[in-house]
Image (cartoon, rainbow, N blue to C red):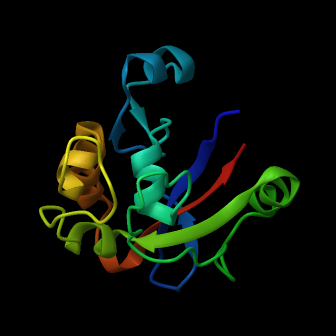
């Protein structure tokens, strides 16, 4: 059975509330066909177990140390639709500020055992991860933008 990520991106308003981020991420061909648009509002929507391990320790067969331990869903500013979906079939919920993703040292060696030998996080994560990470700059102050996510299987 596979595992999928459910993820959305939010920005914090000057009033301190969290709202959905605009569609700033380039859609791949599948997403263009599926969503009928060239820009999407949700990054990292593909199945990549190294990325899942990095974000939350999920499907972590290589022993990769996640960027942070899962934090659960945010206490404020989350839609009840997402809470219901998480409660139905979700696990390992977390959130990360965009600043945390941008400040991480991806060139450091990743923990764990890898068949190809010692690898950096940059080598473990797919190139599209870094493309979408760069596009997060257009969301404004990275300390006031976040991704919220959970997984199902």
Q: Is residue 11 left or right of residue 3?
A: left
- Residue in the foreground of this view, choosing between 14 and 79: 79
Give the quarter of the image for residue 91.
Answer: bottom right
Residue 28 in the image: x percent, y percent? 36, 24
Percent across and percent down for residue 14 are: 45, 83
Residue 115 visible in the displayed image: yes
Does residue 83 sit above or below 73 in this rendering? Answer: above
142 is higher (above) or lower (below) than 55: below
In-front residue for pair 79/75: 75
Q: Residue at x 23, y 67 (%)?
A: 102
**Residue 22 is at least partly visible in this image:** no
Q: As drawn, is 15 to the left or to the right of 91?
A: left
**The residue positioned farthest toward the left in the image shown:** 107
User: Which quadrant of the figure has residue 127?
Assistant: top left
Asked whether 132 or 150 is in front, the reply is: 150
Q: Left or right: 101 with respect to 56?
A: left
> Split into 4 quadrants, where in the image is the C terminus?
top right
Q: Residue at x 39, y 77 (%)?
A: 144
Q: Position of residue 64 (x, y in %)?
A: 38, 62
Q: Quadrant of the N terminus?
A: top right
x, y (%) of residue 21? 47, 56
Residue at image coords 18%, 62%: 106
């Amino acid at each position: 059975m596979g595992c999928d990520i459910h993820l959305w991106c939010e920005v914090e308003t000057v009033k301190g509330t969290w709202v959905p981020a605009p569609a700033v991420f380039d859609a791949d061909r599948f997403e263009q066909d599926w969503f009928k648009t060239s820009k999407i509002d949700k990054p990292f929507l593909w199945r990549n177990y190294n990325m899942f391990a990095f974000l939350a320790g999920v499907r972590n067969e290589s022993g990769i140390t996640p960027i942070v331990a899962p934090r659960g869903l945010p206490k404020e500013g989350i839609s009840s639709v997402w809470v219901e979906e998480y409660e139905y079939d979700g696990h390992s919920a977390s959130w990360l500020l965009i600043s945390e993703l941008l400040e991480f040292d991806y060139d450091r060696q990743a923990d764990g055992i890898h068949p190809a030998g010692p690898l950096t996080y940059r080598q473990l994560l797919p190139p599209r991860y870094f493309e979408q990470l760069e596009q997060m700059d257009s969301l404004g102050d990275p300390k006031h933008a976040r991704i919220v996510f959970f997984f199902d299987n």
